[in-house]
Image (tube, helix red, strand yellow):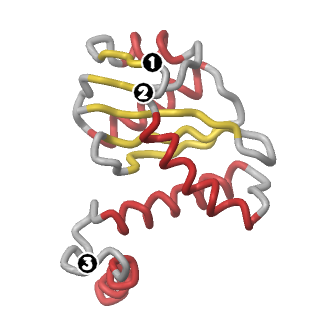
Amino acid sequence: MAIWSTGRRRTRGPGYVYRAIDQHGQVIDVLVSARRDAAAARRFFRRVLATVKVTPSEVITDAAAIHPGVLDELIPQAWHHVEQYANNPIESDHGQLKHRLKPMRGLRNDRTAQTIIAGHAFVQNLRRGHYELAIDSPPATRVAEAFTELAQAI
């Protein structure tokens, strides 16, 4: 299993967005942190490891100086990959989020950013068919049918 991870500063307001995706493009976790330090990276990677419940063999990140130490501490057997263009899957995935946030002119605080970005990741995973909701429907109508199924379940 491989995990791609990146931390990006939001365009407006304080904070960094950490996002992790797996090798299939499914968004695993999102964390908004006021600082980009070892404590935030440790908190993020612990959350990701608790979510996937599998130890990844490969972790691909951007070239932040804090990641090697945190990854050696939490996942010493995983190969930490930081070459140029290695994290393109998450960077291109990040572009869709930025496209969605641009008309909103950014997010003002970390709590709202966490909620909006996690919701965007959920809808993105629904659209890509990573959940067992509306699996038989075409991608264009999958989100609407999934919410119809969710409404009937409630």
Give the alpha-carbon distance from disc 1 to disc 2, as whole Å: 5 Å
Residue at x 32% of width, y 74% of height = 139
Q: Tell me the SS state at disc 1.
A: loop
Q: Which residue is mark 2?
A: 86
Q: Quadrant of residue 33?
A: top right
Instruction: Rate crowding at label 1 as few (under 14), some (14 to 19) or many (20 or more) other CA atoms within 10 Å.
Output: few
Residue 133 lies left or right of residue 11; in this view the side is left
- When the figure is inspected, residue 80 is found, relative to residue 150, above or below; the finding is above
Give the alpha-carbon distance from disc 1 to disc 3, as whole Å: 37 Å
Residue at x 31% of width, y 15% of height = 79
Are dots 3 and 2 in contact, CB under 8 Å?
no
First of labels 1, 3 by sequence position: 1
- When the figure is inspected, residue 49 is found, relative to residue 106, above or below; the finding is above
Instruction: Rate crowding at label 3 as few (under 14), some (14 to 19) or many (20 or more) other CA atoms within 10 Å.
Output: many
Amino acid at the residue labelled 2: Ala
Q: Which residue is mark 3?
A: 134
* Mark sitting on residue 83: 1
Are dots 1 and 2 in contact, CB under 8 Å?
yes
First of labels 3, 2 by sequence position: 2
Residue 14 lies left or right of residue 143; in this view the side is right
- When the figure is inspected, residue 22 is found, relative to residue 59, above or below; the finding is below
Q: Could you say where residue 154 lies in the image, as x and y percent from the top left? A: 34, 84
Q: Tell me the SS state at disc 3.
A: loop
Residue at x 48% of width, y 49% of height = 93
Q: Could you say where residue 149 lies in the image, as x and y percent from the top left? A: 30, 84
* Mark sitting on residue 63: none
Amino acid at the residue labelled 3: Ala
Q: Quadrant of residue 122?
A: bottom left
Residue at x 50% of width, y 46% of height = 92
